[in-house]
Amino acid sequence: MAALAHTQLAALNRLLAEIAPTNRFYRGKLAAAGGLDGFESLDSFRARMPFTTKAELARDQIEHPPFGSTLTFPAETYTRFHQTSGTSGRPIIWLDNDASWQWVIENWKNIWRGAGARAGDSVFFAFSFGPFLGFWSAFYSAQQLGLRTIPAGGMSSSERVRFLLAQRPRILCCTPTYALRLADVARQESLDLSGSGVEVVMVAGEPGGSVPEVRARIEQSWPGAHVIDHHGMTEVGPVSYGSAADPTRLRVMHDRYFAEVLKPGTNVPIAPGESGELVLTTLGRAACPLLRYRTGDLVKPVALPGEEPAAYALAGGILGRVDDMVIVRGVNLYPTAMDAAVRALAEVREYQVEIDQRGTLAEIRVRFETDAGTADLTTELAARLRAAFQIRIEVERVPPGTLPVFEFKARRWKILK
């Protein structure tokens, strides 16, 4: 058995020994799979253990309110409350006790190290803190590593830019969309970001940081800074991270997760070079574990030079969501591909994609804002979209301020049914 597989199997069986006696959600599943006493191999775990889905977790919390039956320990021993964003349905509540919360924090420390963060650096958190996991785990892990944490909640974008310029942090932490939004606000108010002090823009919450066109736009907007991407989920924790030396791939924390990439909707592994759905098993976080969790994230695994084939990275980061794909005139469209095509034009400030599925054939239109006086920008964008997707896409320029702006996850796709 390869060293990584041995490490993962040992961690998995330690986790199962801890959760099997008391975790109501998984005890029955483990019994049916013959795994109450652990598994003899990762292959047997893959073959016999059923999947966990987000819809299943949501249903469990409805049937066993308020927290569901996934807790391994008594509810009164849990100290952290978080919930998912609800972008794919009903928000899911997720609790941690002190030990599981520290497991999450240790994962985040890998992300900071990958970004080159060092004790004494200051980190500017450009978002309003809510019940989502990522903000809090990033904040507390930074403190434990000796970083100076600067919270910027409860402010307008204009106030955040001015506050950032006054504090001159080395690291800015936000979504890709909001990094561009802050730069737009600075430009509109004639504030010079070349003296911001920001050297690292750490992004997550949505695809984009690993997309070359989006990354280039952010780095152009924040002179002297480079973009670091990472990804995770409230119910799973921090999963992967990038680096300045390898910006187009996210390294999976294989010692913390058993990761599978399967053909969507199946238990069939993808072939080499293909993309598929990421399925994760937490190898810790015993207070609230997840076994073979179908994340819905589309990824493309690639081997890392000099490492075991199982220790792969994710080329291009998160490519999209299984349920985000729409088909227009026989063409599969993903938000990340659209973002790459649109963001290649620096003059586009904001955009929205409208998919009209009310007729016999779906129609697509891209609305965009710009403050540039270029008369033929609409024609140029339409030509770029046609070249990227091989279909005609209607393009409409709208006045600045027409389209919504986003602080957290952008929702630029509007589906009309």
Image (cartoon, rainbow, N blue to C red):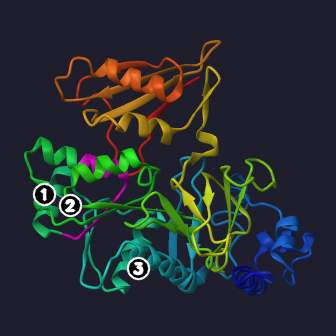
Q: Please state, as top left, top right, bottom left or bottom right, where the N terminus lies in the image.
A: bottom right
Asked if the stretch drawn in magenta spans residue 347, the answer is no
Which residue lies under the disc numbered 1?
194
- Give, as a single range, the part of the protein colored magenta: 169-181
Determine if residue 397 is in view. Answer: no
Dot 1 crowding, Cα within 10 Å, few <14, some 14–19, many 20+: few
Query: Hey, what amino acid is under mark 2?
Result: Gly
Which secondary structure, mark 1? Answer: helix
In which image quadrant can residue 242 be found? bottom left
Determine if residue 236 is in view. Answer: yes
| Discs 3/2, front | 2
Which residue lies under the disc numbered 2?
224
Query: Hey, what amino acid is under mark 3?
Result: Ser
Which secondary structure, mark 3? Answer: helix
Query: Hey, what amino acid is under mark 1?
Result: Ser
Which residue lies under the disc numbered 3?
141
Mark 3 or 2, nearer chain start: 3
Please state the horizontal and vertical placement of residue 374, each as a whole percent of the image: 20, 22
95 and 36: which one is in front? Answer: 36
